[in-house]
Amino acid sequence: MVTARIVCFGELLLRLTAPERELLLQSPRLEARFGGAEANVAASLAVLGHDSAMVSTLPDNAIGRAGVGELRRLGVDTRGIRTAEGRVGLYFLAVGALQRPSEILYDRAGSAFACAAADAYDWPALLDGAHWLHLSGITLAVSADAARAARAAVHAAREHGTRISFDCNYRSKVWGNRADEAPALLRELAAEADLLFGNDRDIALMLGLPFPQQPTIQRFRAAAAAAFAAWPRLRYMAATERGHDSVDHQQLAGLMASRDGLHQTRRYSLNGIVDRIGAGDAFAAGLLHGLLRGMDEAATLDFAVACACLKHSLAGDVNQLREADMLTFLAEEGLDVRR
Amino acid sequence: MVTARIVCFGELLLRLTAPERELLLQSPRLEARFGGAEANVAASLAVLGHDSAMVSTLPDNAIGRAGVGELRRLGVDTRGIRTAEGRVGLYFLAVGALQRPSEILYDRAGSAFACAAADAYDWPALLDGAHWLHLSGITLAVSADAARAARAAVHAAREHGTRISFDCNYRSKVWGNRADEAPALLRELAAEADLLFGNDRDIALMLGLPFPQQPTIQRFRAAAAAAFAAWPRLRYMAATERGHDSVDHQQLAGLMASRDGLHQTRRYSLNGIVDRIGAGDAFAAGLLHGLLRGMDEAATLDFAVACACLKHSLAGDVNQLREADMLTFLAEEGLDVRR
Amino acid sequence: MVTARIVCFGELLLRLTAPERELLLQSPRLEARFGGAEANVAASLAVLGHDSAMVSTLPDNAIGRAGVGELRRLGVDTRGIRTAEGRVGLYFLAVGALQRPSEILYDRAGSAFACAAADAYDWPALLDGAHWLHLSGITLAVSADAARAARAAVHAAREHGTRISFDCNYRSKVWGNRADEAPALLRELAAEADLLFGNDRDIALMLGLPFPQQPTIQRFRAAAAAAFAAWPRLRYMAATERGHDSVDHQQLAGLMASRDGLHQTRRYSLNGIVDRIGAGDAFAAGLLHGLLRGMDEAATLDFAVACACLKHSLAGDVNQLREADMLTFLAEEGLDVRR
Amino acid sequence: MVTARIVCFGELLLRLTAPERELLLQSPRLEARFGGAEANVAASLAVLGHDSAMVSTLPDNAIGRAGVGELRRLGVDTRGIRTAEGRVGLYFLAVGALQRPSEILYDRAGSAFACAAADAYDWPALLDGAHWLHLSGITLAVSADAARAARAAVHAAREHGTRISFDCNYRSKVWGNRADEAPALLRELAAEADLLFGNDRDIALMLGLPFPQQPTIQRFRAAAAAAFAAWPRLRYMAATERGHDSVDHQQLAGLMASRDGLHQTRRYSLNGIVDRIGAGDAFAAGLLHGLLRGMDEAATLDFAVACACLKHSLAGDVNQLREADMLTFLAEEGLDVRR
Amino acid sequence: MVTARIVCFGELLLRLTAPERELLLQSPRLEARFGGAEANVAASLAVLGHDSAMVSTLPDNAIGRAGVGELRRLGVDTRGIRTAEGRVGLYFLAVGALQRPSEILYDRAGSAFACAAADAYDWPALLDGAHWLHLSGITLAVSADAARAARAAVHAAREHGTRISFDCNYRSKVWGNRADEAPALLRELAAEADLLFGNDRDIALMLGLPFPQQPTIQRFRAAAAAAFAAWPRLRYMAATERGHDSVDHQQLAGLMASRDGLHQTRRYSLNGIVDRIGAGDAFAAGLLHGLLRGMDEAATLDFAVACACLKHSLAGDVNQLREADMLTFLAEEGLDVRR
Amino acid sequence: MVTARIVCFGELLLRLTAPERELLLQSPRLEARFGGAEANVAASLAVLGHDSAMVSTLPDNAIGRAGVGELRRLGVDTRGIRTAEGRVGLYFLAVGALQRPSEILYDRAGSAFACAAADAYDWPALLDGAHWLHLSGITLAVSADAARAARAAVHAAREHGTRISFDCNYRSKVWGNRADEAPALLRELAAEADLLFGNDRDIALMLGLPFPQQPTIQRFRAAAAAAFAAWPRLRYMAATERGHDSVDHQQLAGLMASRDGLHQTRRYSLNGIVDRIGAGDAFAAGLLHGLLRGMDEAATLDFAVACACLKHSLAGDVNQLREADMLTFLAEEGLDVRR
């Protein structure tokens, strides 16, 4: 099987989670895993059989090395992770329940990644052999330096002929008091993307346009039309659509637009969610997988939504399931114990 | 913000819970937390910003001191907890699932609290500066001494001008073979209450009247009318109304009557309950909070029900959430991860 | 209360489960319990008050002795468990969630049980005083030796006048490349059974007949008719019928046919399943309990389904609840905390 | 191998231990195991291959049944454990370290065992077939009723021809305010014993005599002489002698006197103790094992000390090792990994 | 008992420890406790019965509030902890073993405390009623702002007549690239101290003098002489002296000089250390306790060393033992289980 | 830094350890890690900065993939691990204490590795670029097929010019009933080795010669002389020498002979061992590291012993420390907390 090389650029974070749906520090214990939007995509693509590589900056201390090791365990090429002084960014997570939403407390200011200069990365070498570069709006939000580095990556990719996948991933807590810079920064990267992960709210933020249409599919259609009009390079725009009965019971569908049309999947019921974090990254990885495997658009979107749905059944940020698991999900081949 | 002082009188118990919905001692481990109806109210009020104080009796040993420390951690004034010989009351809890109900095994006979003489408490000093005294029918059930102490507290509060909040909290396992004394003892305290937590079954027990009305709201209306008729001091009567699909999936609504009318909240679906214990105490604290903050009756009841509902999402006896969390719940402002 | 003696023959396995619905080895910890279809029946019958005995083979090492001790803890007579060289069979379990099915990875090849010769068991002595012999198709699948031992057991039971309960329990992963031998081996034991646990798929496999009827009840009726026609000794055939909304949310009903007619229970909703493994064994034990206690057929089936349903609320393979728990379930006497 | 039947009479307690040498409730978790001096002896004898039986009283609730199951798991005959109203006695344990001693907090007042009337036990039936009755001074301390029951047991054993093993086991916290009754009560049982576990302090307490000799061996010799003089039935008196460098580093030797002479073992260094509780009970079981197996006095004492020493390497109250493990210890056959 | 009020000023940190002596993130779990040199002193003094108060800055988020709650649990007056934007400082700890030293990885840059302006604290109000102000050199190292705040505190204490206790607590990893400022900053605070915790290396660093004497006692004597000469306010200088056989096996003695002479305790062997962090803070609290209780100098030093030694037996940063525990240690009253 | 490529051939095992020094299954939990003599060497060399590769056979199931991922996490090149039908070999470990030795219970019969045919490995490709091939006598013991595969590997290495490192690693439980084949099989590989890990007992077994000399160093000298005489290719022979005070307290020294002479290190005291498994593999990796880095013989042996000693301070089979940690150990630069 021909494998593609995908380079993901972003921050790897140590995630510290309160156990068993407790509030933070209700018990004197935290579960420690690694995550981060782009790293989640890299890891999921590696598990799906691709040659995925992570580009990032981490300190050369026990936490940073553990993060690199975890990505390596999952099969990600970590040679592009440089070391530098500084800290590992953290996020604390209290998993919600019922009508109590999960809460993330970011503690990532001053991380080695956030402090890395824009020119710290040797993009021509890092992108050598890469078919896709994946990055997200979080990196733009992390720091001005990180945003500059992301721009440099995108421009190098353009020169190098590497396709660009960009996930808007708007997180208000990360943008903090730099929120007014968000539209311009996001827009600049969206303009270079072949594949854009975003919904009507993202497009509205970037283009300053309202999308009052109902239902969701019409809003997405209008937003995609605006995006395709604004950014001539753009080929695909995709998003998940989420409904909530409660924190543990949600519904998920997928939407994807190309210049040729629009696809929407059925709406899956997710009843008894284990861990919702990283579902969007699983979706992104699944969509890239579909495109790279040459699936048609509808099958690609179905596969991506299967990834996103099944991620909710897994602890941790990363969808660690393999292609066959998603195909079984789509085939609805039975939910009883496999034995 | 002006804060009120609320004094809660009752027993603090060590709660020993089988982990992960196992039966008791299926694994050789118990989770240890503290609870108790009145302490739960005190702790929740402290978290909500009030000056709440606990009056109780505990032995001066490692378990008793840990209980005091836990209340102090939550912000409760524990100077009113006296020490005496004896044991700390316990309860073992096996959390149920599906159609297997949760089971409590009380082990509280002979506790320092149960053995404390009625005159062990210096009520004039303990009630100094207090706006409310909160107690519950459990204390009446614990022992004859405890019942006498509760009566002494209530009478001192009356003399002192402290308002009285009384939660009937009928627990057949605690009353045990003193069950026939329950109606008279409960009635005596209900007669002194400004605020009574109880439903039609509680009123029926105390007043010896049947409430055969349908639906629940009519039974509650009739019971409240009987209560207001019987007890001239009573200003408010409140209760939760609970429906069960299974142990993990229930519904909750709130009811409150004043001499001016009746309020009922919408019925909330609780799908995927983490810990149901203490929901009634969260409701009581929420209701006191509403009254103390000067909310109108409907808003007070809504707030109390929000407390009760969200308590189901939290491990342990105590609603440790803050006012903003309940207001978000009531505003239905979104169930997705906050980040 | 007169108790009956039931002898169960089969393999005891060490079950190694990934914690908290993780994938296998996502965290470096496995929960270790013992299980096995026939041992689960023996344990459940012991908890229900019967004189149940296990006949098996285990090595005399720390794992084997722990397994014997666990059965003894549950009240099973373990004197019929012989020791021999070899290993303890294992199974690894990753508990699923949402639409990700639970997965069992068997690691039982070459176990002391699988390697035990057919004549290793002194059946006349082992069946002395036994009213029932219970075994399952898994033993036929484990190895040719185990299958021969099962046949020897059945023939000894026939000579000894012990009734035979046989659970088809078809597991494709255990049969592996001996799957083509399955129909004949299963058929031989089914032909000797007084009580057969199996559904239309099992009968179809054994008799080579199709059962295309709809709905399930008609398929079961037709299959039972075929079974009663084929096997004159057969008195009862029973099965559970399962529906899946997701891994955590299923429905369960019970079906039982005798030569006099057919019974079907109501369909119970299981919403928030803790552990689905062993539900069929709980059903078998419940059904045997009903027959042994002289319940009528409908009550017997109701009791068995109550066992199967409540098993889903318990961690581990074994239904450790007592008769009163099942009767409470059937009486629908309330799901709130018992206190 | 001929096995002897030993009946042990005493209380089974739920032991709740703070994890990892923490203080009690420093973390919200307790490790739950069962223990009790006489039950530890019964369990250890069962593991050593004897027919040991426990006589006690426990409530018929989840905790009581779990205790019975645990003894059964270890191979103890539990049919002599009667059920009665009441609670299970508890003890909380904070394991010490360095120069911080381990602390036991007893919570056993009012237990079902303590409240059982002296005539609750049918001793002729319970002692049927028994070669030895083992009991300890703790039972005398638990309550006046328990003391009367112990006396009844001893008198029945005398009539029945069952030998008596009595461990003085003086625990000041259990005697509490009944301490002044201790000498007479202990003396009465010591007077009936064939085998007495006690040291010079125990004899001094019972006989009111000082033993100022140095070193320990001379004190023990003098105390044994006094004991043999006072109690004509007594055949053996045994004790461990313990030295402390710190909580984790101790030394242990064994002493045994018969009417023919005195034995003392070498002094073993215990460096890195896992759990010291129950070492005396392991010693008692080991000594009974040696006598029952017909070892000579020196070998019996060696074996008993090996049991006591190795118990320090095991978590929980009970020495779960087998005879071969003790013989390996005595043979000093190597401390490296067995593989 | 008259209690003194001691105000401690410094940073409260969240400590994240790898479990069971593993390397950081070897398992996906961290134990979470709070610590910090001055907070440890405050907590220990509160447990010893004093009115201790903490002055610090923490963010008003879940982590900061948990830290405040933990201090409150231990009895510390936390009203002097202000809230501000920023993060909670962290430290990761891998506990060593054998010859592998424990490693601390600080992650405290940019904390709310480090960023708090020197004038953020209202010292006259905060020191109202305080008999002692305790602070340490760590605060000088944390940031220039924190150092200025410490100086302001000391000057306010001088004006207010509050005595000053200063622990040099030199940590090279915290000073980082500000290490060249350390001597002058430390010297300035030492010059104001009534009580100085430091050894010859600290005095050498501050005064630029060599202390080549042997053995330790002579070096300490010479350093104390230099300190008393340099700083006229100084009344006491104290330190622990530590020897290492391995990470788990150390020795500890105490040294204290006054203008009248020198005291040295015996050297205690610590064999099987549970947690060495915070021993110096336990020593400081013990010494303050002795002075406040009016013990003589030798008894004060003995008590302080007892605190330091016993801290090694406790998990977490804080000596949570009470006065009686230290007195038992000093009386060498037995290391066997207390029962 | 020039890195060498070392290929390690052997079996990767899942290690299942009872927690906290309990006996196996005393608690229902097992800690799961991966290990295996040759994999431990490969992992340690990767952490030390070398290009190490593992050649083995594992099934393509969740356990096998987890093992590969774990090696990858540690930096080992796992592309040489082939997949095949079968199981993952296991070993159960009960960690001892005091005088109770640790016990390993192997459960590795019938593993995919043991069943792999000798010609399953493409050695010319696998050894391409390799400077060393490391294997051990365990592979010879696992199965006749594995032994043939090891021989094929060695012969390919000889042809390819790859140096050979062979660790005798005699494990009687693995050889089982093939023990009489051991001398010849071991001798054949020893004859090809450049570097042999073994002591006088290994040489005695292989050459059938007695080494009665005292002390150890003389026995090692004589054995080395015999080895150099027997096997002309041999350049180095090395071993550790271990003394035991108890399971937790041991001593370790290193011995190495070349044709030019003999080296012996000082004897290190290991007091408070965390995990002794894998110390020999850490020694082997350290010795290879020294040779590869061009250290002189004495420094190489010192480094190897440092690796072996520090491994005892780490949980799990693998020495995960880095070169600087061993140099610090050798420099004896301080055992206090690094902060």
Image: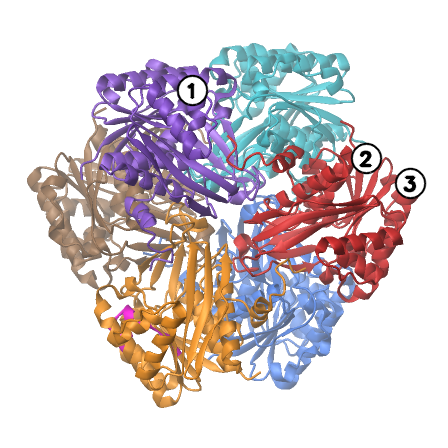
Chain colours: A red, B orange, C purple, D brown, E blue, F cyan
Q: Which quadrant would residue D165 be assigned to in this image? A: top left
Who is closer to the viewer here, C11 or C262?
A: C262
Residue C206 badge: 1
The verdict on residue B144 being magenta is yes
Q: Nearer the viewer, mark 3 or mark 1?
A: 1
Magenta segment range? B134-148
Give the amino acid type for the residue marked by disc 2 in the picture.
Met
B140 up-or-down from A228: above or below: below
Who is closer to the viewer here, D313 or C26?
A: C26
Residue B178 badge: none
Q: Residue at x 65, y 66 (%)?
A: E168
Q: Which quadrant would residue C336 be assigned to in this image? A: bottom left
Q: Secondary structure at mark 3?
A: helix
Q: Secondary structure at mark 1?
A: helix
Asked if residue A313 shows in the view, the reply is: yes
Who is closer to the viewer here, B80 or C161?
A: C161
Q: Quadrant of the N terminus of chain F?
A: top right
Q: Quadrant of the C terminus of chain F?
A: bottom right
Chain letter behind tag 3: A
Q: Residue at x 61, y 66 (%)?
A: E64
Q: Which residue is mark 3?
A: A160
Would residue B119 appear left or right of C216 to someone viewing this image? left
Q: Nearer the viewer, mark 3 or mark 2?
A: 3
Chain letter behind tag 1: C
Q: Which residue is mark 2?
A: F1
